[in-house]
Amino acid sequence: MSAPALPASLVDNPRLDRWIRFLPDRTVRIATGKVEMGQGVVTAIGQIAADELDVPFQRVTVLSGDSDEGPDELYTTSSLSVEVSGGSVRLVCAEVRAKALERAALRLNCSRDELSVVDGQILQNGAATGQDYWTVAPELDLSQAVTGTAPVKPASAYRVVGQSVPRVDLPAKVSGAAFAHDVLPKGVLHARTLRQPSRGATLESLDEAAIRRAAKGELQIVREANFVAFVSPVESVAQAAATAAPNHATWKNARRLDPVQQEAAWLEGQKSDDRRLGAPERSTPARNLVTATFSRPYIAHASLAPSCAIAEFSNGRLTVWSHGQGMHPLRRNLAEALGLPAESISTRHLHGAGCYGHNGADDAALDAALVARQLPGRPIRLQWRREEEFGFEPVGPAMLVRLHVDLDEQGRPADWTSEVWSATHVQRPGNGTGYLLASEAMANPPPEVAPFDPPEARGGGGTRNTVPIYDVPAHRVLHHLVLRPPVRTSALRGLGALPNVFAIESMIDDLAARAGQDPLAYRLSILSEKRARRITELVAARANWSARGPAGTGEGLGLAMARYKNRAAYAAVVAAVTVQETVRVDRIWCVADAGLVVNPDGARNQLEGGIVQAVSWTLKEQVKLDENGIASRDWESYPILRFSEVPEMEVEFVEPAGNPPLGVGECTVGPTAAAIGNAVAHALGVRIHDMPLSRDRIMAALLKG
């Protein structure tokens, strides 16, 4: 009999003691390499452990993102935390539970089948034995590798999984004690930076005297090649220095941009690495070809708090606290950038206010470390300014998506080609994909890396969700990975899923109109996937789709559906909108299938959060460029959805289909954007193909229509 396939996290971190410890205070400490970013993963993993071990949830603590103590699970990405890390914890706890019962049976000289666990206590035929996990733990060899052979609990035995347990990370966040920005170690020095305007730019002169006059307080200026930081025991002094510094710095060889590069249309025709995926080219000419082009602009993470890190270099050891998404990768990347042994660096996770992708958190960690190395023995708290956050974080790539669909005699897709132009969606540091930003300002910067996009086996990047879930006999993807975008791009929630789903679901609505059919009926006529059909029918019923009015009245109802990465959670969304000079989203209905839902309230929050962010992206957000780089550097030039604009939402899960859990953090963004696009098309009687669906685009579409 072959060994069971283990989750990747267990393959990479096989020792049991890397995951679980029984502590003297009679609690169980579970460690995970995944970090808490507001998705409730720490709570959900604690629930899984509590059920597999038969201990009260209150006895479980979860250590998240500690390079010294926890497993290396790379980055917290792609809605995989509960599925992969939670699945790993489930197997580890089942195995440790089995080992504990085997050891107790030897102690009690009884059959293993006579024993059970209740609240961490080991019972024999239902009676107390005086034994529990903590009495037998010293005799368990947890240095062994997990085998994955211990049976896990059936869903019918769950007591904590499936319950809306209050999230354990919220009290500290509400009280202001959780975020990296709120941590003030004794003797802390505050730091800000002067950012190198672009790779290859060199600092010719810096008027330090003028900067000190503007700072009006005790100030140290730390410089290493083209990296400059301003450090003070008083935060406002460091802030004033950094605000003044750009006016007193002269740079040479700074890159100049053309504002036209901010539009996705600019991508077509640029130098690219081209790939063809899927079905071979058709051998016969198209009979009834429909072609349409859709786009999304560059978008920012727009984290509510700018990036921040704390670093201390003492006695040859560097400790960094960061709200990045992977503490083990951060340790390796810092070691490479600083020329230090990885063993001399500890990286620990702190909460940050907003992320869902690769923002400036890791870059701020290197900034803080560079300052700490020059000022040893003092903790350095380095925070980016708002202008710096918008101007220098990696942004989500602009994408141009052109669909070519050949229809059969019934007006249904017979052949489908998705053609995508996009810069890379992954430039996280390390493994030859990217570097920490300040590395480029060093005397010997690392060489530029060749653009890379995740392979389709990991969900793809620009190609994510390019394959329709519908019944299409032949499908292919033409992927143009643009090699020299005007700005640094990297991971943002969902990667290419949102523009690809927006394009596919918009096309489905337009094909329905060509066939003279209702969009719901048309979808169901080409959709045999049972779970997808179920949620589509349910969300239509919730939204009273049958009462949908005629097009062109200014009020619209739109529907869209997708399965994230075509293998994670399913989400179907209906949006109700009112369109006058601008679009107002009045109401959203969502039905999702996420398999086993560990914490319903936490998972529902993820669906709702994805909806809100998608509304903002679809209606408002676009990075603007000028000749100096990113020009949208404040909340006025980069507006996001306001609380007053958040629509009413009805969100529900279908009855769980059992294990495994399917990641939900990113599954609603694509269907929400597409549902809004379809609702706006219904309201206006004409389609807007490019996001954001702004006032100017509404007017242009009406004039063209």
Image (cartoon, rainbow, N blue to C red):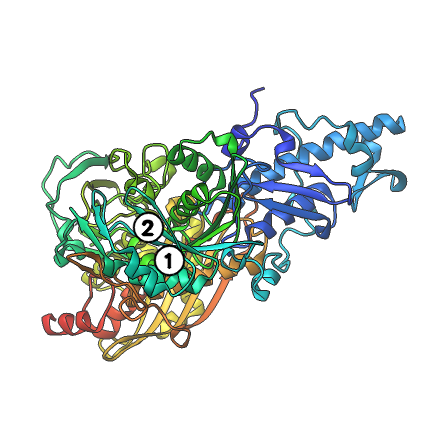
**Can you see residue 558?**
yes
- Disc 1: which residue: 669
Residue sitting at the far front = 209
Q: Secondary structure at mark 1?
A: helix
- Quarter of the picture containing the N terminus is top right
Left/right placement of residue 703 relative to residue 251 reads left
- Quarter of the picture containing the C terminus is bottom left
Q: Amino acid at mark 2?
A: Ala
- Where is residue 171 drawn, in percent x and y? 61, 62
Q: Earlier in the sequence, mark 1 or mark 2?
A: 2
Left/right placement of residue 424 relative to residue 165 reads left
**Can you see residue 559?**
no
- Residue 643 in the image: above or below residue 475: below
Residue at 22%, 76% (x, y): give it: 552
- Where is residue 205 drawn, in percent x and y? 22, 50
Spatial separation of the CA atoms under disc 1 and disc 2: 8 Å
- Where is residue 346 drawn, in percent x and y? 53, 38
Give neighbour class at mark 1: few <14, some 14-19, many 20+ (Cα, 10 Å): many
To which quarter of the image does residue 631 belong? Answer: bottom left
Depth check: give the residue in front, 34 or 591: 34
Left/right placement of residue 598 relative to residue 698 reads right
- Where is residue 686 drawn, in percent x and y? 18, 69
Q: Secondary structure at mark 2?
A: helix
Confirm or deny contact between disc 1 and disc 2 (CB under 8 A). yes
